[in-house]
Amino acid sequence: MSDKKFLTAEEVSERYRGSVSVGTLRNWRAMKVGPTFVKIGKAVLYPTNELDAWDQKNTVTCRASKALDAVRSKEL
């Protein structure tokens, strides 16, 4: 991860390889959904720790992964 503590909307779009556009981020801010952001004057910034938390919240766990985790926990 980068040493930056905040990313711009353009940098967030790059982080997600363009699958989340700057326009989508703008719409999400208006609807109060999506990753947490900070607004200072006209500047909109996304804390990297909040983006990491948002990634974690949106992680999809497959059934096969759950079964493997259960097997591993029994082995311990």
Image (spheres, grey):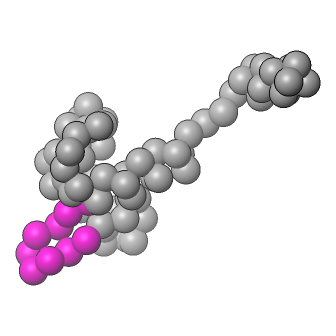
Q: Residue furthest left?
A: 42
Compared to residue 10, the image places residue 74 above or below, namely above
Q: Position of residue 2 (x, y in %)?
A: 22, 40
Q: Position of residue 44 (x, y in %)?
A: 17, 67
**Residue 50: quadrant of the picture:** bottom left
* Picture residue at 47% right of the left edge, 53% below the top: 53
Give the left or right position of residue 29, taking residue 8 as reference. right
The kind of secondary structure the magenta stretch mainly shows is strand
Q: Position of residue 76 (x, y in %)?
A: 85, 24
Q: Is residue 40 magenta?
A: yes
Q: Is residue 63 visible?
A: no
* Picture residue at 26% right of the left edge, 59% below the top: 46
Give the left or right position of residue 5, taking residue 57 as reference. left
Q: Residue furthest bottom?
A: 41
**Residue 32: quadrant of the picture:** bottom left
**Residue 64: quadrant of the picture:** top right
Quarter of the image with the N terminus is top left
Q: Nearer the viewer, residue 71 or 12?
A: 71
Q: Position of residue 54 (x, y in %)?
A: 46, 52
* Picture residue at 10% right of the left edge, 80% below the top: 41
Q: Is residue 16 visible?
A: yes
Q: Nearer the viewer, residue 73 or 67?
A: 73
Please provide the residue range marked out in magenta: 38-46
Compared to residue 11, the image places residue 32 above or below, namely below
Q: Residue furthest front?
A: 76
* Picture residue at 77% right of the left edge, 26% below the top: 69
Q: Is residue 49 magenta?
A: no
Q: How many labels sit on residues?
A: 0
Compared to residue 51, the image places residue 67 above or below, namely above
